[in-house]
Image (cartoon, rainbow, N blue to C red):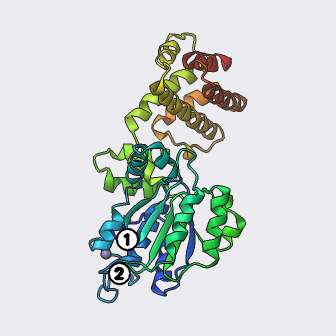
Amino acid sequence: MPFSDFHGNPDVVRTAREMLAHDRFPHALILSGPQGSGKFTLAQMIAKAMNCLAPPATNDRPTTDRLPDFCGRCANCIRIADADDLEARFAEAVEVRESMRDADKRETRIFVQTHPDVTIIPPDPPQMLVKVDQVRHVIGEIYYRPSEGRERVYIFSDADFMKEAANSLLKILEEPPDFATIFLLTDNPSALLPTIRSRCMHLRLAPLSTQEVEDYLAEVRPEWKVRERGLVARLCGGGLGRARSFDLARYLAARQDALALLASAMGARDHSELFKVTESYRSGGDGKAKLDSTIRVLYSLLEDLLFVKSGTPEMVRNTDILSELNRMSEQVDFEWIVTATQRLGELESGMRRNLLRSLALDSFAASLEK
Ligand SMILES: [Zn+2]
């Protein structure tokens, strides 16, 4: 999977490869962008290009751009690629720690390392922050020359640091070795310490356009209908990872419930449909996940109603029910939509305090009746 397989943001990819070509890749790089924009995928690709044992020749392919690439087939590429599925490797590392004796558990920090020279440092659970011991581990080995590749690579897959960890990282950033590169991946670069930011170069990945997501889905989800791919692309707001694993059937079921709730809130006389829906939200972990997705769908429907009302239907995400949204929007005014959004926020915080789910949904709908 060479660089040409990266989706979107061609300018950022070209910049990174040009820096590689001129041997001017920075020792510390902030790679920022929304969830699903490909930060980790790109960092992995760069790590492979830095360490590939058989990089595609840059002068015998007249049709390509002649910038550095990686083969995807050599021992280094393959071992680095073992961490491409970061979620799975992370879960394995956490499981190993869970199986340890308590004393060892406390001492053990989470890393993902499938190649001796490439280390991924995910945020450490349960706080999901990078801890000082993780950074100390990096300090302990970053000054040794790479053993099987050309470059030591450290990828902080979600650069959300505990204070002490951030201060430790600064020490490395002040004097990084020539043969090491540190990636800080984040969807919120402004949360990083200014002293860290000032020592790093910064590349930003923009969210992908709906068309780019649709093209990607055509490749990885050919079994989906064109209409379904279009809908998923719109619903995922430019996130490839989310789009690929999107559970459309589940979404549509939640949307059915959300529409029934809104219809009732908009003053349907017959509430039996509403009660049928809300009754199905029982307590327990399953009910919570179900309610969470219904709340998210409600937000997106209310937002779509706002788009329709404000004369910008091209912004609507639930495009397949546009005529239904049009009909609904005629029954309410702006104020109603704003109030409904506020009530939904209250419902959400009520859920965190474990109010009875079915009752909370009933009263959400009832409170909005006109
Ligand atoms: Zn290779």
Ligand 1 neighbours mark 1 (CB distance < 8 Å): no
Can residue 256 be seen here? The reply is no
| Residue at (42% x, 47% y) in the render | 230
| Residue at (34% x, 64% y) in the render | 81
Front one among 175 and 240: 175
Residue at numbered disc 1? 4
Ligand 1 neighbours mark 2 (CB distance < 8 Å): no
Q: With 194 as the anchor, is 177 left or right in this view?
A: left
Q: Are marks 2 and 1 in contact (CB under 8 Å)?
A: yes
Q: With 146 as the anchor, is 224 left or right in this view?
A: left
Quarter of the picture containing the C terminus is top right
Q: CA distance from mark 2 to mark 1?
A: 10 Å
Residue at numbered disc 2? 64
* Quadrant in the picture for residue 326: top right
Indicate the position of residue 305 as horizontal and vertical percent values. Answer: 60, 35
Neighbours of disc 1 within 10 Å: few (<14), some (14-19), many (20+) = few
Q: Is residue 231 above or below residue 293?
A: below
Sequence-wise first label, 2 or 1: 1
Front one among 276 and 103: 103
